[in-house]
Image: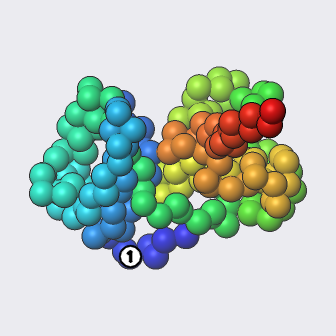
Amino acid sequence: MNDENQTMIRFIDSSYRTLFFIPDGGTIIVTRSDGGKVKRACTFLDEYHTRVGRETYHICQFAKLMERVGNTYAPEQLPQLPSQCFSILPTTGEIIRIEKGKQGYEKCGFSTDDPQTNRRKADSLNARQRITPQMEAAMLGGAMKGWASPAARVSSYDVRGNPMKPARARSRKPKEAER
């Protein structure tokens, strides 16, 4: 978990959903629509403004620009798993609490009958602790599939918490039979 007093830069999507945080002076990797990657240092200006490379952006302006041109962005360094987080039980939509390293989960007494309301509440509780969708997905994966499994790795998910496709093994050309 990050130091509570460390200045952090929040990155969001164009709907203001938090994607990740990086420390002031940290770097992001921007993946262009053509697959090219560029590294950009970032500077905290205030809660809603940051300098990415040499340009200053409102955080939503940056998100909209990246979406419009088909780019994605992620922290250069993957975050560590938190000691605990909140999530939604996929089968019922109830809010659950997950502890790192502990199999399963604990149901929370403040769930509503509405899964969407529960999702917003879990997101809000996690955001207060700088827990991102990517971290939450890895925590849920660890609680459900085991902490030693790939499902418990932050690297198994994108910044929105969606599972990443495994890297395909490079195909080799079969050797031509000798004549």
- What quarter of the picture does the N terminus occupy? bottom right
Q: Is residue 86 visible?
A: no
Label 1: few (<14), some (14–19) or many (≥20) C-alpha neighbours in 10 Å = few
x then y, percent, for residue 21: 41, 57
x then y, percent, for residue 75: 42, 56
| 120 to the left or right of 107 | left
Q: Which residue is found at the position 81% from the left and 33% from the top?
A: 179
x then y, percent, for residue 74: 42, 50
| 77 to the left or right of 146 | left
Amino acid type, callout 1: Asn
Classify 5 as above or below 101. Answer: below
Q: Which residue is found at the position 12% from the left and 52% from the top?
A: 55
Q: How is the image coloured?
A: rainbow
Say how many tags the image has: 1
Q: Nearer the viewer, residue 174 or 49?
A: 174
Q: Is residue 76 visible?
A: yes
Q: Which residue is found at the position 58% from the left and 41% from the top?
A: 161
Classify 34 as above or below 9. Answer: above
Mark 1: secondary structure: loop
| 1 to the left or right of 63 | right
x then y, percent, for residue 177: 80, 34
Q: Mark 1 highlights which residue? A: 5
Q: Nearer the viewer, residue 35 or 75?
A: 35
